[in-house]
Each structure stands twice: as structure tokens, then as C-alpha cells.
Amino acid sequence: MEQVAVHPQLKQVLVCCNQRGPDSTMPCCGDTGSEVYAKLRGWVTRYGLTSRIYVTQTACLGWCHGAGAMIAIQPDGIYLRGVTPADVDQVIERYLKG
Ligand code: FES
């Protein structure tokens, strides 16, 4: 194994985009997660922050919520659930800028 050198202020935003089958009784982040991911990724790209903020699609992060997506911001240990595309600007202002 090899340790990799990363930006000293690297943040990684994990966005659940998990999809469950139509027979599942569990909520999932699914399409909302994909929309949240696209909006976050667009912001990071637009402002040239791709080496400092990684936005990554994931499977289930474990706090499923039917009304929005689950995201985790590391290494800050921030976990947010029920995130919708309308919340993304607030996520950026509170947790990613600076
Ligand atoms: S399906 Fe997204 S946190 Fe479980």
C-alpha cells in the first residue's frame, strides 16, 4: 500500500445516490442524491476547487431519509440528511467555503 499526498485542506463530500428497487420498503436518497451531487459538483468545478473538495457519489451511508439525500463532509465529521437541491447553497456557505 502507498499513502498518497493530498491537499492539506482537502474536504471530501460523500453524497448518497443509493437506489432501491420498487419493492423496497426502505427510503432511499436516489434521484435527489443525484441532483444534489450534480449541483455540488457543478459548484466545485465552476470555482476551480476540484483539487481541494472532492465530491463523490456513494451507496447508502446509513441514515436513509425519504425526503432528501444523506451527505457526509470529511474530515469535518459533518453528517446531514434530508438534503435537497434547494439546500445545496446553504451547505456550501456553511461547510465548504473558506
Ligand atoms: S439510502 Fe441514502 S443513506 Fe441510506
Image: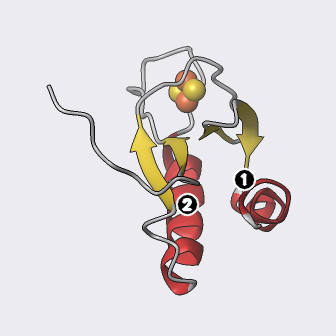
Q: Is residue 62 above or below residue 39?
A: above
Distance, label 1 to label 2, CA atoms, is: 8 Å
Q: Residue at x 60, y 24 (%)?
A: 27
- The amino acid type, in three-letter code, at marker 2 is Glu
Instruction: Report the front residue among 22 and 19.
Output: 19
Q: Residue at x 72, y 53 (%)?
A: 84
Q: Is residue 58 above or below residue 86?
A: above
Q: Do callouts 1 and 2 mark residues in contact (Cβ within 8 Å)?
A: yes
Quadrant housing residue 70:
top right
Label ID, residue 35: 2
Whether residue 36 sits left or right of residue 24 in the image: it is right
Residue on which the image places disc 1? 84
Q: Is mark 2 within 8 Å of ligand 1?
A: no
- The x and y percentages for residue 57 are 42, 46
Q: Residue at x 65, y 20 (%)?
A: 63
- The amino acid type, in three-letter code, at marker 1 is Thr
| Name of the residue lying farthest toward the left | 1
- Which quadrant is home to the N terminus? top left
Whether residue 92 sits left or right of residue 94 in the image: it is left
Query: Is label 1 in a helix, a strand or a loop?
Result: loop
